[in-house]
Image (spheres, grey):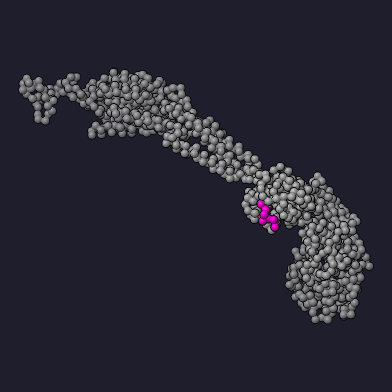
Amino acid sequence: MPFLNPFLLGGLVFAAVPVLLMLLMNRKRIVLPWAAYNWVREVVVRQKKKWQIDDLLKLFSKILLIIAIVLMITRPFIRLEGVRGKTLLVLDNSPSMGLRIDNETQLDKAKEHMARFVQDNRNDMALYSFDGKFDPVVSVFTDDKQALTEGLKQVELGTTFSGASTWFQELPKLPVMGDTERIYFVGDFQAHWYADGARISEAMKVLGKGYPLTWHQVEGPHDVDNCAITRLALTSDGAFLGRNSMVEVSILNGTAEQTDARTVSLYVDGEQKVRTTIKLEPNELREIPFTVSLGEAGRHNVMAEITADPYERDDVRYLVVDVPDVLNVLAVVPRHDRAPFAFDTYIRGALEGLIEDEDALQYSSIEPSELLRADFSKVDVVLTVNMPLSGDMPYVARLRTFVEQGGGLVAFLPAESPDDAGMFDVVGRVVETREHVDGNVLQNSYLAFMTAPELKPEKIIFTRSLIFDDVPEEEIRLRTVVGVNAFSREMGEGRVVVLGFVPYQNFGNLHFNPNYVQMCLRLFWEARGHRAEYAVSGEFESWSEPGLARDAAYVLRDDKGGQWALSVDGLGEDTSLVLPPDLKLGFYSVSANGEEMFRVGFSIDAGDSIVEPVTEGALKDPIEEGLSFVTGDSPLNGLSRIDLFPLVLLLLLGAIAFEAYAHFFRDDEIDRGKIGT
Amino acid sequence: MPEPKHALEKYFDGDAVAQLTAIGYKPMHLVEGHLVGDHRSPFHGFAVEFAGHRQYVPGDPPKHVDWNVYFRSGKLLIKQYAQETNLVAHLFVDVSETMQFEYKGRSKRDYAAFVAVAIAGAIQAQKDKVSVHFFADSILAEESATGSREVIGKISNYMEKSELKGDTAIGRILSMAAEDLGRRKAVFIVSDFFNDVESMFDGMKRLLYNHNEVILLHVLDPLELDFNHEGPIELVELEGEGRRLVNGRSLREGYNKAFGAYREEMETSCRKLGIDYVLCNTGESFGLTLAKYMNTRIARISG
C-alpha cells in the first residue's frame, strides 16, 4: 500500500511501547508477604481469565491506537485503475522538456507515458500541449486511440513556458473543461515553477477539492550539468563602420555544481570569429565581452554558442546587428575668442581616435550663422556645442525638421539660461554648484561604464550645468545629485541626445576623464538611427513596428527557406506584425513588398534553464488537497488515487472507542457484576 | 508507635494505659474471681463468706429474707454476703505467621502487642488479674492469672523475641480454653482472625456457654481493609506456599468485596452472640481505638 508520507512509517515502532511498558512494569513489581491470602486466591481464581482478557484488550487497544495515529500521519492511499470519465490529457512541451538524456528528450519520454496511458484506458480523451499556454492537439473528446497517438507524435517542443499558476488560470478556459472529469498531465515539473506547494494547493481550488487530477513527472536527473546563454547583445559603444564592435555574451551555470570546461564561440554570418573556454562556478552568471569585426555596412547575423549539454536549446543565441554606413557628422560650433580651442575639439578628437578607419567618419564643422544655408542631405548627426536651442531661434526650425525626418542631433547646451533647452520641450534650470554624477542612474543607461571604479566616476564634477525637469525615467542618460543632466528622446523619426553642459575645460573636468572619450562614441551611436535586433520566446508572437501599411505584403522568412505571410495589427504609429505561432529558433527577416525591412534573431528565453525537477515533498500541500503526483515508469502511474484518510480516521475513532471500552465501560460492567463475577 | 521505655516493656505505652485505666474496664456481666474485688459476684451463699443477718425493712427484696429463721423464730431477717469479687481477664494473643504482616512500616505483630500490653496494664491497674495465652495452631505459651506487673514485661518480651510461625487455629484453641478457663471470665482475643469463621465462632460459643465475656480485637492493616495498591504486585502467602502476581488495580474491586464480606460476617456473628467486636486498624492509634471502645462499653453498662 502506498503512503503519502512513507518515511513516517517508522513511527510504527512505537506500537511496541505498550508491550515494553507492560514488561517493564511487571519487572518493577513489588513482592509483598500477604496475610489475607485466602481472599486474594478467591478473587484470582474467579477473575483470572477476565483479567487476562482485560489486559490483552487494553494492550491491544493501545497498540491499535498507536497504529491508527501513525497511519493518520503517513496517509495511506490506493491507486485506482480505470476510473471512468472523460479524461483531459495535457502534455508539457515547454523548452525544458528538450532536456536530452541518453539520446532521448524528456518530451519523448512524456509521449511514451502518455501513449501508454492512452492505450491502457478506455475513456474518451482530449489532448492539449502546454508550454505556458494550452494548445489543442486533439481538441474534442474521442476514444479514437489512433487519432490520439498521432496527435501525440505531432507535439513538438515549444518556446514559451510558465508555471503552475498559469496552468491553473488557463485550464478552466479550455473549451473541453466543461465535459472533463479527470486530468492527466505529464511533464518534467521543474522546481522553479512547481515547488511552491502552498500556492499550487490554493490554485487547485479552481478544480475543487478531491478533483481527480494526476501529475505524472517524467523521471529526470537532478543537478544536471547545464549552462545557458542568457544574453547576447552589442555593448552600448555601438557598431561603427571601420571599427571593431564589442559583443557581450552572458552565460549562466544553473546548477549547484562547477561546470566542465566549455567553449564559447561567436559567429558572424555563419563564420566563427572568436572563441574562448570557460569554467563556471556553481550558479555563476558570467559576462564575456568579445571584440569582433562585424564587417561591411549592413545587417549581420551574429550567433553565440556554447558547448552542447543535455539541455541544448539555451546553448545558442541569435542577434542581428545593422552596421551603419559612413558616419557623417556636421558640427555647429560658435567661435569664442577667449577659448584656446574650439568647443568640439575634444569630441572630434574622440571620434577620430575611436573610429580608426578615416573613411568611416566624415566630420565637418560650421558656424551657427551658416546653419540655415547648410546642406543636411548627407548628414547623419548634427552636433551643436554651446548653442542655445530655444524655440525662437531661427535655425531651430531647421534642426527640428532635420531630426523629425530621421536625423540625429547631439546637443551640448550652454548653461546660460533655462530657455536654451526650449527646442526639446523640457524645462531647464541653471545649477552652479559642484555636483557629482549619480552612479545609481548611470547603472541603467549606456553610460553605466562610468560607474566602474577604475574609471573614477567621482572625478566627474559639474561646476555649472543645465538641469532638466520632467524627463521620463527611460530617457535619462546622466544625472547629477540635483537632477537630470542629459537625456535622449525621439523626435519624429530621429533622435536627440541633449546634454546640459559644454565639454570645455573651463566649465568642468569631464573631458579629462577617460569616460568622456567613450561617451562621445555612444552619443553618436544613440543619436544615429540603428538596429541590433533580437527576440526571445514569449515576446515573439507579434512584432511592433510603427507606420506599417495594411496594403503592403509583409513576409517573414527564416534562414532555412521557410516563409510566412504576415498580417498587420493596429493603426498609424501603433502597428505590429502578427507572427505565426511556434516558430523555431534562428534568424528571421521581414520584408515589405519584396524589400527587406529588418532582420531579427529569435532565441529561447533562459527562464527555463535551471533544470531541476521538483520533489514530491515540495508538493505535500497539493497532494493533501487531492493531487496524485506520480513519478517514473511505475505501472501505477497515471492512475487516480483514493485517499484512505476517512478509513484511517474511522480506525482511529474505533481505537479510541475500544480503548475507552477496555478501560472504563468494561471496568464499569465488572463493578456492576455483568462480567467475571 | 511510641518508643519503648524499657527493654522488657517495649510495647508498654504509659499514656495509653493511664488513659484506659482512667476509663476502667467493667465487666458486662457477673464475674467469678478469686479475691474480693470491685466486681459483682453471682454467688449467693455458696462460695462466698456469710456476713450475718439484719432486720428486714420495707423495701428490701423478699428474696433476701432468711425464711428458715422466719419459720424458726417468726422474725423477718435479711441475709448478708460478701457480694463482690475481683476480675480475671484472659488475653489470647495470636502469634501465627499472618501476624507478621508489615506494610509501610506498620506491623500487625507490634500493634497486637501494644493492644495486649495496654489491656493487661489497664486491668492490673484496677487490681484485677490478667492471664495471657499466646497461640497459633496451639497454645504456644501462657502466663497464669496474676496481678503482678511482670506480666506486662512477659507479654512484651514474648511478642518481641518470639518467632511467629504456624497456622492459626482459633476455633480449636478457644474450645480447649473454654474447658480450662471455667466460668464468668473476661476473654480478650487479639488476632487478625484469618481463619474459618464458623470454626472460630464454634470455639467462642463454648466460651459464651460458660458465661464468659468475649471481646474480639481484630487487628488489620489498612491495606488489608482496602487494597488500594496500583500496579503489579506479587503477593506471597504467609501461611502457605501460594504466590500470585496480580495487578493491584484489577485485584482491588474483587478483593475488597470478598474481604468486606468476611468482615461483615465477623461483625454480624459477633453481634448475634453478644460478643464485642473491636476493629484495630493498624493505621490508627491503638490507644485511641481502645479508649473509644472502653468508653462505649461504659456507656452501655451505665445505660
* Left or right: A90 in relation to A675: right
Residue A497 shows in the view: no
Observer-nearest of A568 and A382: A568
Q: Position of residue A96 (x, y in %)?
A: 77, 52
> Which residue occupies 23% across, 34% down?
B303
Q: Position of residue A127 (x, y in %)?
A: 73, 52
Q: Position of residue B154 (x, y in %)?
A: 34, 22
> Which residue occupies 53% across, 37% down?
A61
Total numbered circles = 0
Quadrant (top left, top right, bottom left, bottom right) of the N terminus of chain A: top right
The magenta span reads A174-183
> Which residue occupies 78% across, 52% down?
A155
Residue A17, placed above or below residue A530 = above
Observer-nearest of A75 and B25: A75
Asked whether residue A175 is drawn in magenta, I would say yes
Observer-nearest of A275 and A671: A671
Residue A497, by quadrant, is bottom right
Q: Position of residue A296 (x, y in %)?
A: 92, 63
Residue at the extreme left? B74
* Left or right: A656 in relation to A401: left
Residue A227, placed above or below residue B57 = below
Asked whether residue A653 is drawn in magenta, I would say no
Quadrant (top left, top right, bottom left, bottom right) of the C terminus of chain A: top left
* Left or right: B50 in relation to A292: left
Residue A180, placed above or below residue A654 = below
> Which residue occupies 73% across, 43% down?
A633
Observer-nearest of A56 and A117: A117
Residue B66, by quadrant, is top left
Residue B177 shows in the view: yes
* Left or right: A646 in relation to B295: right
